[in-house]
Each structure stands twice: as C-alpha cells, then as structure tokens.
Image (cartoon, helix red, strand yellow):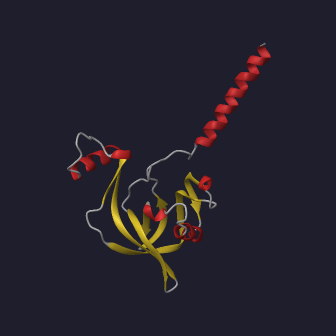
C-alpha cells in the first residue's frame, strides 16, 4: 500500500512538473509598450530597390481596464455597457498609411495562422517565431485565415523594423 501511495504521489508530482514546464509561453501575454514600438494594420508588403517595405496604418491598441476607459470615451451609443467587448479596444483617429523598411534580419512572432492548409492547422501557438520569408508567405495566403485583419506591433530601431509581432484578437 505504501508503495502504491508513493508511486501515485510521484506520478502526480511528475505530471505537475511536465504540465508547468509546458505552460511556459503557452498563455497570452500582452506586448509591452515602449518608445520604439508602434501598432499598425498592415495594408501591403512590397520589395523596392532590393529592400522590403511594409505599408501600414498606425493604430492605438488597448487592453483590460485601459481598453474599457477608451471604449467609454469614444463610443456614444453603448446602452448599459460598461466595458470594451472582448477585453480590447482599437482607436484609429487618423487613417494614414506610412511606409516602414523591414530589416532583413527582423524577428517575426506569430500567434495564429494557417500552418498546413487545413482548418485544424489554423491554431494558436503563442509567439511562434517564423522567418521573414515564411511571414511573407503567411501574409499572402488568405485561403483559410486572412492575417492582414490582425494588428501587428512593430519595433523600430535605426529607422528599420527589427521585430514584428502579430496581435492575437479573441
């Protein structure tokens, strides 16, 4: 009996360890705000003179209590609603396309895209790193999921985009 209790306790401990080890990076975490990070809706990606450029409309992305506050400030016909639906709110007071050069070594982190051409392959993998070449292919493939409908956080250094992070929308 003591061996069985010991074995069961050991198995539960091991299962808890494995579960917690796999949980690292498996939950949504907001992209931290910084002076060199902006959020855009991408309208196009194109090569010009041997460099890759992104055309995008800068937006303001809010989550949580901040989203609720902005929602209440900007919306007028909301009845008895007291918070932003789905926990986020986007403000785009001025629609203006800007061009951003992408560093050829830019890091790209995706949350949700078509992995294999099946509906089962359209699944969330938090901050999955993909190459810039793969990102271009993902962006152009809108058969099952159009990633151009998602906001992207851009980190800009020395006037070039060095990091692109897809914003998950529930």
Q: Nearer the viewer, residue 141 or 34?
A: 141
Placement of 53 over or under 78, stated as above or below: below
Q: Position of residue 42 (x, y in %)?
A: 42, 68
Q: Residue furthest top?
A: 1
Q: Is residue 10 left or right of residue 49?
A: right
Residue 57, quarter of the rendered image:
bottom left
Q: Nearer the viewer, residue 45 or 140?
A: 140
Identify the residue at horizontal 43%, vertical 64% (top origin): 154
Placement of 14 over or under 158, stated as above or below: above
Placement of 68 over or under 158, stated as above or below: above
Q: Position of residue 11 (x, y in %)?
A: 72, 27
Q: Is residue 20 left or right of residue 170?
A: right
Q: Which quadrant is home to the N terminus?
A: top right
Residue 116, quarter of the rendered image:
bottom right
Residue 64, quarter of the rendered image:
top left
Identify the residue at horizontal 58%, vertical 71% (top origin): 133
Q: Is residue 151 left or right of residue 16?
A: left
Identify the residue at horizontal 22%, vertical 42% (top origin): 79
Q: Position of residue 29 (x, y in %)?
A: 47, 48
């Amino acid at each position: 009996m003591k061996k069985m209790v010991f074995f069961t306790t050991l198995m539960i401990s091991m299962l808890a360890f494995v579960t917690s080890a796999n949980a690292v990076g498996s939950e949504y975490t907001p992209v931290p705000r910084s002076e060199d990070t902006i959020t855009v809706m991408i309208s196009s990606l194109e090569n010009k003179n041997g460099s890759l450029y992104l055309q995008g409309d800068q937006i303001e992305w809010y989550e949580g209590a901040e989203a609720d506050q902005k929602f209440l400030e900007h919306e007028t016909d909301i009845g008895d609603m007291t918070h932003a639906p789905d926990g986020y709110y986007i403000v785009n007071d001025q629609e203006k396309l800007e061009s951003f050069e992408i560093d050829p070594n830019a890091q790209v982190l995706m949350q949700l895209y078509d992995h294999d051409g099946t509906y089962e392959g359209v699944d969330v993998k938090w901050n999955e790193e993909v190459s810039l070449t793969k990102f271009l292919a993902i962006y152009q493939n809108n058969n099952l999921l159009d990633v151009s409908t998602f906001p992207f956080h851009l980190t800009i250094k020395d006037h070039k985009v060095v990091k692109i992070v897809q914003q998950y929308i529930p």
